[in-house]
Amino acid sequence: RKEVEQDPGPFNVPEGATVAFNCTYSNSASQSFFWYRQDCRKEPKLLMSVYSSGNEDGRFTAQLNRASQYISLLIRDSKLSDSATYLCVVNSAGQGGKLIFGQGTELSVKP
Amino acid sequence: EPEVTQTPSHQVTQMGQEVILRCVPISNHLYFYWYRQILGQKVEFLVSFYNNEISEKSEIFDDQFSVERPDGSNFTLKIRSTKLEDSAMYFCASRRNNQPQHFGDGTRLSIL
């Protein structure tokens, strides 16, 4: 089983649509969870941390289910500028704090 | 907003040559990382560094790789004898205690 697994994508949606990304992780001892965004051939940029109680930042809502080892990201009212690859990222349980990345889900928002 | 900076943005090197990739982490950060991303693949962890020593490294980080923090601001990744398969984007990241990692904009390494 992959350490972090995401929907394969790509997702092609019209502007204004709601889109949901799913992610599962294999290590139950993982401590921290994030969604990063990556534009083509650029660096990953932190979109939001994911907390057990769920958290929202504007149009973005993240959920974590530790029992199911499942993370989600919901984007409401999608914009053209949301087009990017969305990376599910888990902080390993090890001392060094390394990040383990999913392979990413590409989102393309069309006019 | 402070940034992690990396130089050069693109490095082209002959196979077998040594290459040094440079990073300046955010100034009050204490934890430093190198990752790589081969074209079309996911981001992979290479090494983490804290308190002037390696805290963790991956299987990719073999004897050909080394890291240094020579002067308190720079954080370098050296590849001693490059191979074709070392061609990738290399990202440096840093963080404060209990905070998310922030990434530099990467160095594209092309091995010929």
Image (cartoon, coloured by chain):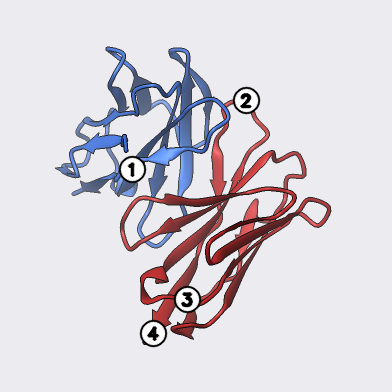
How far is mark 3 from mark 2, CA to CA? Answer: 37 Å
Chain letter of disc 1 in the image: B
Do callouts 4 and 2 mark residues in contact (Cβ within 8 Å)?
no
Q: CA distance from mark 4 to mark 2?
A: 42 Å
Rendering quarter of residue A18: bottom right
Q: Residue at x 35, y 28 (%)?
A: B26
Question: What is the display colour for chain B?
Answer: blue
Residue A78 - label: 3
Same chain under badges 3 and 1? The reply is: no
Foreground tag (2 vs 1): 2
Q: Residues within 10 Å of mark 3 (few under 14, many from 20)?
A: many
How far apart marks 1 and 4 lie (CA) works out to: 31 Å
The three-letter code of the residue at mark 4 reads Lys
| Secondary-structure class at tag 1 | strand
The disc placed on residue B90 is 1
Q: Chain of mark 3?
A: A
